[in-house]
Image (cartoon, rainbow, N blue to C red):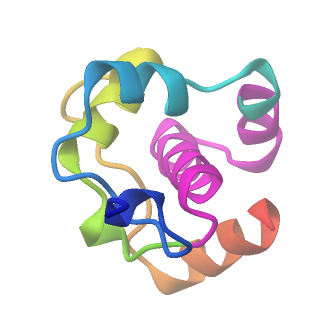
Amino acid sequence: MTSIERTAYPRFTRAPSVKELREIYIPTSTDIAFVATTARGPAQKFGLMILLKVYQRLGYFPKPETIPGAIIGHIRAVMKLPADLVPDIASNHTLYRYYAAIR
């Protein structure tokens, strides 16, 4: 039987592997340029990058609280951001603006 992560309705794996993180969640130069021109501060850029990468993987926008910490931590490390920086994806206004930009 096909795993749920590979069906028409993909979901996050329970514990993403290092290989999966490297293959799917490392921002490309195009991703970095898009985020740099769309968001302003570090927390906003961090939040937008998270949403962009999970949208590219899943094809839809999940609820922010369902995004695994391993993915957030990996993107934080790749972007060389401090551990205490919280991504700006809490307000609905911000989310809708980012959704529109990504689509």
Q: Which residue ends up furthest to the front in the rendered image?
A: 1
Identify which residue, 12 or 45, lies in the foreground. 12
**Is residue 62 visible in the rendered structure shown here?**
yes
Q: Residue at x 61, y 26 (%)?
A: 27
Residue at 52% over, 32% down: 24
Q: Position of residue 32 (x, y in %)?
A: 71, 27
- Does 4 appear above or below 14? below
Taking the image as shown, residue 76 lies to the left or right of residue 68, namely right
Looking at the image, residue 56 lies above or below residue 37? below
Query: Which residue extends farthest bottom?
Result: 92
Q: 65 or 3: nearer the eye?
A: 3
Residue 6: give x, y in percent of width and height: 46, 57
Q: Is residue 47 magenta?
A: yes
Which residue is at a point 76% across and 61% down the rendered structure image?
A: 102
Q: How many marks?
A: 0
Using the image as rendered, state which of residue 99 and residue 54 is in the foreground: 54
The main secondary structure of the magenta stretch is: helix
Residue 74 coordinates in the image, percent (x, y): 33, 27
Residue at horizontal 17 percent and vertical 52 percent from the top: 14
Q: Is residue 49 magenta?
A: yes
Q: What is the span of residues highlighted in magenta in the rendered image?
A: 32-60
Q: Quadrant of the C terminus?
A: bottom right
Q: Nearer the viewer, residue 9 or 78?
A: 9
